Amino acid sequence: MLSAQIESILFVTNRPLSVKKIAETVGADRTEVSKALDEIAAAYNTEGRGVRLLRHGDDVQLSTAPEASALVQAYLKDETTGELTKPSLETLTIVAYRGPVSKAELEQIRGVNCSLILRNLMMRGLVESVGEVGKPETRYRVTMDFLRFLGVAGVEELPDYEKLRSHENIVRVLAMANTPPAVNAASVEEPAPVAANAATAADGTR
Protein backbone atom coordinates (compact mmCIF):
# COMPACT_ATOMS: atom_id res chain seq x y z
CA MET A 1 0.00 0.00 0.00
CA LEU A 2 1.47 3.33 -1.10
CA SER A 3 0.47 5.28 2.00
CA ALA A 4 2.14 2.66 4.23
CA GLN A 5 5.37 2.88 2.20
CA ILE A 6 5.42 6.67 2.43
CA GLU A 7 4.62 6.58 6.14
CA SER A 8 7.57 4.24 6.73
CA ILE A 9 9.95 6.53 4.84
CA LEU A 10 8.80 9.60 6.75
CA PHE A 11 9.12 7.74 10.04
CA VAL A 12 12.81 6.88 9.58
CA THR A 13 13.76 10.24 8.06
CA ASN A 14 14.85 13.01 10.42
CA ARG A 15 14.30 15.84 7.95
CA PRO A 16 11.55 17.15 5.63
CA LEU A 17 11.13 15.35 2.31
CA SER A 18 9.78 16.84 -0.90
CA VAL A 19 6.87 15.25 -2.72
CA LYS A 20 9.21 14.83 -5.69
CA LYS A 21 11.76 12.92 -3.61
CA ILE A 22 9.08 10.69 -2.13
CA ALA A 23 7.65 9.98 -5.59
CA GLU A 24 11.09 8.99 -6.89
CA THR A 25 11.70 6.75 -3.88
CA VAL A 26 8.43 4.81 -4.04
CA GLY A 27 8.18 4.80 -7.83
CA ALA A 28 4.87 6.65 -8.03
CA ASP A 29 3.77 9.91 -9.64
CA ARG A 30 3.22 13.11 -7.66
CA THR A 31 -0.57 12.87 -7.86
CA GLU A 32 -0.55 9.41 -6.28
CA VAL A 33 1.86 10.57 -3.60
CA SER A 34 -0.25 13.63 -2.78
CA LYS A 35 -3.34 11.46 -2.43
CA ALA A 36 -1.48 9.06 -0.14
CA LEU A 37 -0.23 11.99 1.95
CA ASP A 38 -3.83 13.17 2.34
CA GLU A 39 -4.70 9.71 3.69
CA ILE A 40 -1.79 9.82 6.15
CA ALA A 41 -2.75 13.33 7.27
CA ALA A 42 -6.35 12.26 7.83
CA ALA A 43 -5.15 9.42 10.05
CA TYR A 44 -2.65 11.46 12.07
CA ASN A 45 -4.02 14.99 12.22
CA THR A 46 -6.92 14.20 14.54
CA GLU A 47 -7.52 14.88 18.21
CA GLY A 48 -5.85 12.42 20.54
CA ARG A 49 -2.97 11.46 18.23
CA GLY A 50 0.61 12.11 19.31
CA VAL A 51 2.03 12.52 15.80
CA ARG A 52 1.17 15.00 13.05
CA LEU A 53 1.97 15.20 9.35
CA LEU A 54 3.39 18.65 8.64
CA ARG A 55 3.19 20.10 5.13
CA HIS A 56 5.01 23.26 4.09
CA GLY A 57 4.97 23.98 0.39
CA ASP A 58 6.31 20.87 -1.33
CA ASP A 59 7.91 19.49 1.84
CA VAL A 60 6.36 17.05 4.32
CA GLN A 61 7.55 15.64 7.64
CA LEU A 62 6.19 13.66 10.58
CA SER A 63 6.32 15.58 13.86
CA THR A 64 5.08 15.25 17.41
CA ALA A 65 1.77 16.88 18.36
CA PRO A 66 2.02 20.44 19.78
CA GLU A 67 0.12 19.48 22.93
CA ALA A 68 2.85 16.97 23.77
CA SER A 69 5.70 19.46 23.32
CA ALA A 70 6.49 19.89 27.04
CA LEU A 71 6.77 16.14 27.59
CA VAL A 72 8.83 15.67 24.42
CA GLN A 73 11.23 18.47 25.37
CA ALA A 74 11.74 16.97 28.83
CA TYR A 75 12.46 13.57 27.31
CA LEU A 76 14.84 14.97 24.71
CA LYS A 77 16.73 16.86 27.41
CA ASP A 78 17.45 13.56 29.14
CA GLU A 79 18.38 11.97 25.81
CA THR A 80 20.89 14.67 24.93
CA THR A 81 22.56 15.06 28.32
CA GLY A 82 23.01 11.45 29.40
CA GLU A 83 25.91 9.19 28.48
CA LEU A 84 26.18 7.97 24.91
CA THR A 85 24.99 4.44 24.26
CA LYS A 86 27.31 1.84 22.72
CA PRO A 87 25.54 2.10 19.29
CA SER A 88 25.92 5.90 19.43
CA LEU A 89 29.62 5.60 20.26
CA GLU A 90 30.13 3.15 17.39
CA THR A 91 28.37 5.49 14.96
CA LEU A 92 30.29 8.52 16.23
CA THR A 93 33.56 6.63 15.84
CA ILE A 94 32.79 5.75 12.22
CA VAL A 95 31.80 9.34 11.42
CA ALA A 96 35.01 10.62 13.04
CA TYR A 97 37.32 8.28 11.14
CA ARG A 98 35.45 7.96 7.83
CA GLY A 99 33.56 11.25 7.57
CA PRO A 100 32.14 12.84 5.63
CA VAL A 101 30.09 9.65 5.32
CA SER A 102 26.55 9.06 4.10
CA LYS A 103 23.77 7.46 6.12
CA ALA A 104 23.74 4.53 3.69
CA GLU A 105 27.47 3.95 4.23
CA LEU A 106 27.04 4.10 8.00
CA GLU A 107 24.24 1.56 7.86
CA GLN A 108 26.26 -0.69 5.57
CA ILE A 109 29.06 -0.76 8.12
CA ARG A 110 26.87 -1.16 11.21
CA GLY A 111 24.16 -3.32 9.65
CA VAL A 112 21.30 -1.38 11.28
CA ASN A 113 19.25 1.76 10.66
CA CYS A 114 21.09 4.81 12.00
CA SER A 115 18.42 7.53 11.63
CA LEU A 116 17.63 7.97 15.31
CA ILE A 117 21.26 7.69 16.37
CA LEU A 118 22.33 10.35 13.87
CA ARG A 119 19.53 12.63 15.03
CA ASN A 120 20.64 12.21 18.65
CA LEU A 121 24.29 12.91 17.82
CA MET A 122 23.29 16.01 15.86
CA MET A 123 21.14 17.25 18.74
CA ARG A 124 24.14 16.83 21.05
CA GLY A 125 26.22 18.95 18.67
CA LEU A 126 28.70 16.14 17.99
CA VAL A 127 27.78 15.48 14.34
CA GLU A 128 26.63 17.76 11.52
CA SER A 129 25.31 17.23 8.00
CA VAL A 130 27.21 18.58 5.00
CA GLY A 131 26.84 18.61 1.24
CA GLU A 132 29.60 17.61 -1.15
CA VAL A 133 29.96 18.53 -4.81
CA GLY A 134 28.98 15.59 -7.01
CA LYS A 135 27.39 13.69 -4.13
CA PRO A 136 23.63 14.30 -3.92
CA GLU A 137 23.04 12.43 -0.66
CA THR A 138 23.51 14.08 2.73
CA ARG A 139 26.81 13.25 4.40
CA TYR A 140 27.87 13.53 8.02
CA ARG A 141 31.02 14.61 9.83
CA VAL A 142 32.01 15.44 13.40
CA THR A 143 31.65 19.04 14.57
CA MET A 144 34.11 21.57 15.90
CA ASP A 145 32.58 21.00 19.34
CA PHE A 146 33.49 17.31 19.11
CA LEU A 147 37.09 18.21 18.30
CA ARG A 148 37.17 20.78 21.10
CA PHE A 149 35.89 18.24 23.63
CA LEU A 150 38.65 15.82 22.64
CA GLY A 151 41.29 18.55 22.61
CA VAL A 152 42.44 17.98 19.02
CA ALA A 153 42.81 20.46 16.18
CA GLY A 154 41.41 18.10 13.56
CA VAL A 155 40.34 14.51 12.99
CA GLU A 156 43.84 13.80 11.68
CA GLU A 157 45.06 14.01 15.29
CA LEU A 158 42.77 11.20 16.46
CA PRO A 159 44.58 8.01 17.60
CA ASP A 160 45.85 5.94 14.64
CA TYR A 161 43.76 8.08 12.27
CA GLU A 162 45.40 7.14 8.96
CA LYS A 163 45.58 3.44 9.84
CA LEU A 164 41.99 3.16 11.01
CA ARG A 165 40.51 5.44 8.32
CA SER A 166 41.88 3.13 5.63
CA HIS A 167 41.23 -0.12 7.52
CA GLU A 168 40.77 -2.83 4.88
CA ASN A 169 37.56 -4.17 6.46
CA ILE A 170 35.88 -0.77 6.42
CA VAL A 171 37.07 -0.02 2.90
CA ARG A 172 35.72 -3.38 1.74
CA VAL A 173 32.34 -2.81 3.36
CA LEU A 174 31.98 0.69 1.93
CA ALA A 175 32.71 -0.70 -1.52
CA MET A 176 29.57 -2.80 -1.03
CA ALA A 177 27.46 0.11 0.23
CA ASN A 178 24.94 -0.22 -2.57
CA THR A 179 24.91 -4.01 -2.62
CA PRO A 180 22.43 -5.85 -0.34
CA PRO A 181 22.34 -7.52 2.08
CA ALA A 182 23.73 -5.25 4.79
CA VAL A 183 27.00 -6.37 6.30
CA ASN A 184 26.88 -7.52 9.89
CA ALA A 185 28.53 -4.90 12.10
CA ALA A 186 30.43 -7.64 13.92
CA SER A 187 32.48 -8.26 10.78
CA VAL A 188 33.98 -4.78 10.92
CA GLU A 189 36.68 -3.95 13.41
CA GLU A 190 35.77 -0.51 14.70
CA PRO A 191 38.41 1.76 16.26
CA ALA A 192 37.90 1.62 20.02
CA PRO A 193 40.21 4.39 21.34
CA VAL A 194 38.16 7.31 20.06
CA ALA A 195 34.93 5.69 21.26
CA ALA A 196 36.11 5.87 24.85
CA ASN A 197 37.25 9.45 24.34
CA ALA A 198 33.93 10.32 22.73
CA ALA A 199 32.09 9.07 25.80
CA THR A 200 34.19 11.37 27.96
CA ALA A 201 33.52 14.22 25.55
CA ALA A 202 29.79 13.58 25.66
CA ASP A 203 29.85 13.80 29.45
CA GLY A 204 31.28 17.28 29.04
CA THR A 205 28.11 18.38 27.23
CA ARG A 206 25.94 17.89 30.33
Image (cartoon, rainbow, N blue to C red):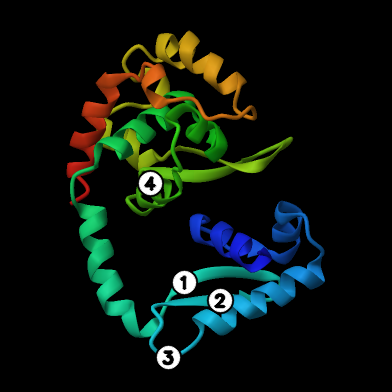
Instruction: State yes or no: discs 4 and 2 in contact (Cβ < 8 Å).
Output: no
Mark 1 or mark 3: name the one nearer the start of the chain. 3
Q: Amino acid at mark 3?
A: Glu
Left or right side of 20 for 110:
left
Mark 4 or mark 1: name the one nearer the start of the chain. 1
Nearest the viewer among 60 and 164 is 60
Find the distance from the CA under tag 4 to the CA under tag 3: 30 Å
Closer to the observer: label 1 or label 3? Answer: 3
Closer to the observer: label 4 or label 3? Answer: 3
Q: In x, y percent, where is residue 149?
A: 26, 37
Find the distance from the CA under tag 1 to the CA under tag 3: 15 Å
Which secondary structure lies at badge 3?
A: loop
Mark 4 or mark 2: name the one nearer the start of the chain. 2
Find the distance from the CA under tag 4 to the CA under tag 2: 22 Å
Can residue 204 be seen by looking at this rendering?
A: yes
Q: Amino acid at mark 2?
A: Leu
Which secondary structure lies at badge 1?
A: strand
Instruction: Identify the disc placed on residue 63.
Output: 1
Neighbour tally class for label 2: few under 14, some 14-19, many 20 plus, Cα within 10 Å: some
Q: In the rendered image, which residue does mark 3 sit on?
A: 47
Q: In the rendered image, which residue does mark 2 sit on?
A: 54
Neighbour tally class for label 1: few under 14, some 14-19, many 20 plus, Cα within 10 Å: some
Instruction: Identify the disc placed on residue 117.
Output: 4
